[in-house]
Amino acid sequence: MPRSTLPFAEDDVPRRIPRLGDMTLADIPPEIGLFPLSGVLLLPRGKLPLNVFEPRYIALVEDALASHRLIGLIQPRWQEDEDEENEAPPLYSIGCLGRLTSMTERADGTYAMTLTGLLRFRLLRETGLRRGYRVARIDVSSFAGDLNEIPSEPFDRTQLLHSLKLYFQKKGLSARWSLIEQMDDSLLLVTLPMICPFPPAEKQALLDAENLTDRVRVLQTLLDLSGPEQEGPPS
């Protein structure tokens, strides 16, 4: 149809959900579908690729696409005497809301998707199951700053990257250091915690950090504690 015959301007068509950068606390639903994943960290403004193949989580993705496109990523809290096959393990109290920003449906009906971190949430109580996935009431009022995060206080970037190289060296990991070194501070402090293979409790400590300044301190401590006993120059 020619543009001149439209009854309204295309720019006037209302959006069903706001743009990612326009989201406010008022746009966050009080109840959210949960995606529990151990050892996986999503931070505000981080991008997390995921493969979704379990029927209950395919249902979660379908329902999120049909509504607000938000999914609550949260870690299970395992106890030593608990069965890790338990389909409803207890959860940590803080998770991160992710918005579905890209998705590909495969021929077998599974999904490859990307969640973009929006803001953290506090788990109030679970309200049952919906199409097999867990649903919970959440509160985001304590994390309003995640929508417009204040930059970190000055930190020793050289020392942080040095510790990171030692950590990767110990773990036998490789990285594109030229790309990491080109990141600005804010992107660096989102990317590094997400890519480092810390244990679940340490990942949670990074998520729980009140702001970027505290996250730097936690990250530096974790890298130093995991570093080699006898430090040498990174390769």
Image (spheres, rainbow, N blue to C red):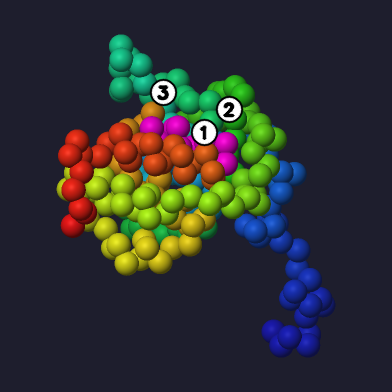
Q: Classify the position of the N terminus by image quarter.
A: bottom right
- Give the mark nearer the N terminus: 3 vs 2: 3
According to the picture, the residue beneath numbered tag 1 turns out to be: 208
Rate crowding at label 1 as few (under 14), some (14 to 19) or many (20 or more) other CA atoms within 10 Å: some
Rate crowding at label 3 as few (under 14), some (14 to 19) or many (20 or more) other CA atoms within 10 Å: some
> Is 230 left or right of 158, judged from the image as shown?
left
Q: How far apart are marks 2 and 1 (CA)?
A: 13 Å
Residue 18 versus residue 36 in the image, above or below: below
Residue 21 versus residue 216 in the image, above or below: below
Rate crowding at label 2 as few (under 14), some (14 to 19) or many (20 or more) other CA atoms within 10 Å: many
Amino acid marked by disc 1? Asp
Q: How far apart are marks 3 and 2 (CA)?
A: 13 Å
Residue 185 versus residue 27 in the image, above or below: below
Magenta stretch, main secondary structure, is helix
Residue 122 or 89: which is nearer the viewer? Answer: 122
Q: Residue at x 82, y 77 (%)?
A: 7
Residue 14 or 141: which is nearer the viewer? Answer: 141
Residue 162 versus residue 202 in the image, above or below: below
The x and y percentages for residue 235 are 18, 57
Magenta range is 202-211
According to the picture, the residue beneath numbered tag 2 turns out to be: 123
The x and y percentages for residue 226 are 27, 36
- Give the mark nearer the N terminus: 1 vs 3: 3
Residue 68 or 197: which is nearer the viewer? Answer: 197
Amino acid marked by disc 2? Leu
> Is 98 left or right of 38, judged from the image as shown?
right
Q: Which residue is drawn at 40% across and 66% down?
A: 182
Q: Residue at x 39, y 28 (%)?
A: 201
> Is 229 left or right of 44, judged from the image as shown?
left
Amino acid marked by disc 3? Arg
Tell me the SS state at disc 3.
loop
